[in-house]
Amino acid sequence: MKSLFLLAVFCLILALSIPVAAADYPDKTVQFVVPFGPGGSTDVATRLLLKTFNKSFPREAVVINIAGAGGAVGARKVHDAKPDGYNLLSFNTILPVLRIMGMIDFNYTDLAPVALFSTSDTGVFVRNDSPWQSVEDMVADAKKRPGKIRFGVGFGTLAHLGAIALEQQAGIKLNIVDTGGGEKKSAALLGGHIDAYFEPVPPVTQYLESKTFRCIGIFSEKPNPRLPGVKTLREQGLDIILMQNNGIFAPKGTPEAVLATLRATLKKTCADPGFQKELTDNNLDVVYLDGQAYHGLLAREFATLQSIAENLQK
């Protein structure tokens, strides 16, 4: 009887301790790790997110940039972190690519996907003085001059896969140049070191508005009303769709109560008109998904990117 009594007491203590811990979350600063340097599309989207997120979250949430190895360093930090909800990963479509390319030894299934919060078109950009008015023009030129068009990417990134997909679909050979990511690609184009590059639209917005760069095609299902006159690649005869989806991940094993708290605040943030306007002004679209819907999207992304990435390794 004594042993049964002690067992009952132990179970009661255990049961009471779990909700108390969940109820206390968060009791300190929550870090949103962006695995890239400042200024890129994921960094911009995450900082805009937290600007509104912090209005209703009990404690301050901050962006921490941990760049390196195409996002692998920051992703590893969160993967290895204690699953308590204080170290989160703000990542995009490139996460499955890192696994496919062998840059990390874990996948999105080895993390706890919290929610998708935004998506953006990706496109091909050239300087405003480029003779190409469309991707069709660039492809026609590439067929005349195989391997001569310098196309900027960060090796092993979504941009790299975009370039490979473009070569496959168009039957061309590009001179793919590893410029690094973010502003490094823009600087390379400005300096005349490359002829074109692949990038999500948000970080290029300033160059489009100043008419320094032009977008000659987007990798989306439908035209972007914020880019009048720019055709999708499908409209230009190439069946390629590559969106950049931005989502939040937690270490696997994070308590469901903690994930629920995060999701509730993220959902509220995504419904905020001010947040929606800020993202729209930065060429981002608010899309909230969690649970099975988000898992389904990640699985489809993985399958699509894997089929492209296999050609990188040949």
Image: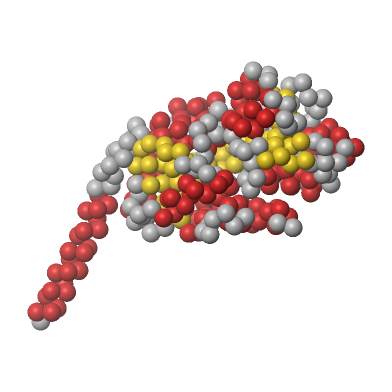
Q: Position of residue 25 (x, y in %)?
A: 28, 47
Q: Position of residue 99 (x, y in %)?
A: 57, 56
Q: Is residue 151 above or below residue 297?
A: above
Left of 201 or right of it: where is 80?
A: left
- The one nearer the camera, 136 or 152, is 152
Display coloring? secondary structure
Q: Residue at x 29, y 44 (%)?
A: 26
Q: Residue at x 61, y 32 (%)?
A: 184
Residue 215 visible in the current orientation: no
Q: Residue at x 20, y 60 (%)?
A: 16
Q: Position of residue 166 (x, y in %)?
A: 76, 44
- The one nearer the camera, 27 or 159, is 159
- Residue that protrudes farthest toward the top in the picture: 210
Residue 311 visible in the current orientation: yes
- The one nearer the camera, 41 or 220, is 41
Location of the C terminus by quadrant is bottom right
